[in-house]
Image (spheres, grey):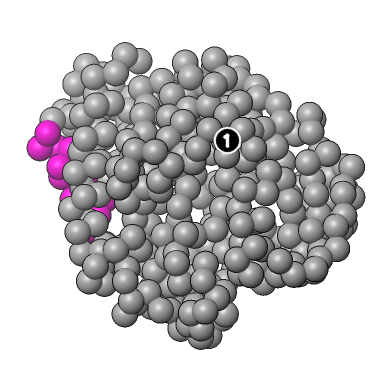
Amino acid sequence: MRPFAYERASDVATAARLGRDTGQGQIDAPTQFLAGGTTLIDLMKLDVLRPATVVDIFALQPGYSQIEAGPNGLRIGALAKMSAVADHPMVLHDYPILAQSLQQAASAQLRNMASIGGNVLQRTRCPYFRDPTYAACNKRAPGSGCSALQGFNRNHAVLGVDDSCISQYPGDLGVALIALGAELELSGPMGERRIAFADLHRPAGGRPHVETTLKPGELITAVTVPPGPWTRRSLYVKVRDRTSYEFAIASAAVALDMDGDVVRAARIGLGGMAYRPWRSAEAEAALASKLLTEQSAQEAARIALQGAVTHGHNDYRPELGRRTLVRALMAAKTMEA
């Protein structure tokens, strides 16, 4: 690990000032925020991230780790631990999709350390990104190319990709949050603002090294989830190569508002195969006011994956994604609201 300066922030204003060089979500930003450290420290050890300064924001607890649920929805402090949110009684009862996405993520030890804000900002597990001996990686070295295009790309994305990067967003919680229409509370040098969670992650767009829309020095302070008639009838289905401590090769976050067997409204997030957390509004629209049957679920799944682009080893993924979404929809249909 390379030498770096260490700063400890006692309040958000100090953190924003110290983090002014965080660089709009760029992977090569000279300053990085440290919370649980479950991603940052790994990448520093791998020599993928080389920050000149690390700003520890752990001291901002407990004010930014509270979990509140009520008639106005759910509010989760960005420093809340994954395990705390997954085990929270109101989350389990009213937002099972969130609890399930967290329970199936990482290991128990990591869930006890990792923060919610850090979790949604985690970097890809693409081996070409995480191994600096591969020179061609536009996310790590802009303009160098993408080794995965012609390399081994079994676990790479098929949705939201272009020739600049086909890396996969690895998170589970983000897929559930985008399905539920979550929002983020942000604080930075220019003050506070709110954005839709869907607006946090940028598309590759030829500039995959700029990963988010966060401004320099800006912190996620809370995640909010609006109330809705679909939150209780919600679930997260994750398909992976093994059942313990593994990232998804396909996942589906589904929330349904039903009138008998008829879908009033559906919320669909796809993970494991997309460049960033992925919501399929087209598949949702295809289900609205329809009987939820195996046939209508398959049609929605076809629509959700119709824009998939594959590169050889990952040719199997669209079909796996379709089957995973159908499985999730049919399972959600049988849940009690």
> What x and y, as percent, mark residue 249?
32, 51
Q: Main secondary structure of the magenta part?
A: helix
Q: Looking at the image, which is closer to me, 130 or 149? A: 130
Can you see residue 213? no
| Residue 151 lies in quadrant | bottom left
> What x and y, as percent, mark residue 22?
74, 63
Q: Would you say 149 lies left or right of 185 here?
A: left
Q: Looking at the image, which is closer to me, 85 or 278? A: 85
- Amino acid under label 1? Gln
**Dot 1 corresponds to which residue?**
109
**Farthest left residue?**
295
Can you see residue 231? yes
- The quadrant the C terminus occupies is top left
Q: Which residue is pictured at 48% across the width and 27% down the height?
A: 99
Q: Would you say 209 lies left or right of 92 here?
A: right
Q: Which residue is pictured at 26% across the width and 72% down the height?
A: 311
Residue 305 sits inside the magenta stretch = yes
Q: Vertically, is 258 above or below 145? A: above
Q: Secondary structure at mark 1?
A: helix
Q: Which residue is pictured at 42% across the width and 35% down the height?
A: 104
Q: Which residues are the magenta region?
A: 294-307
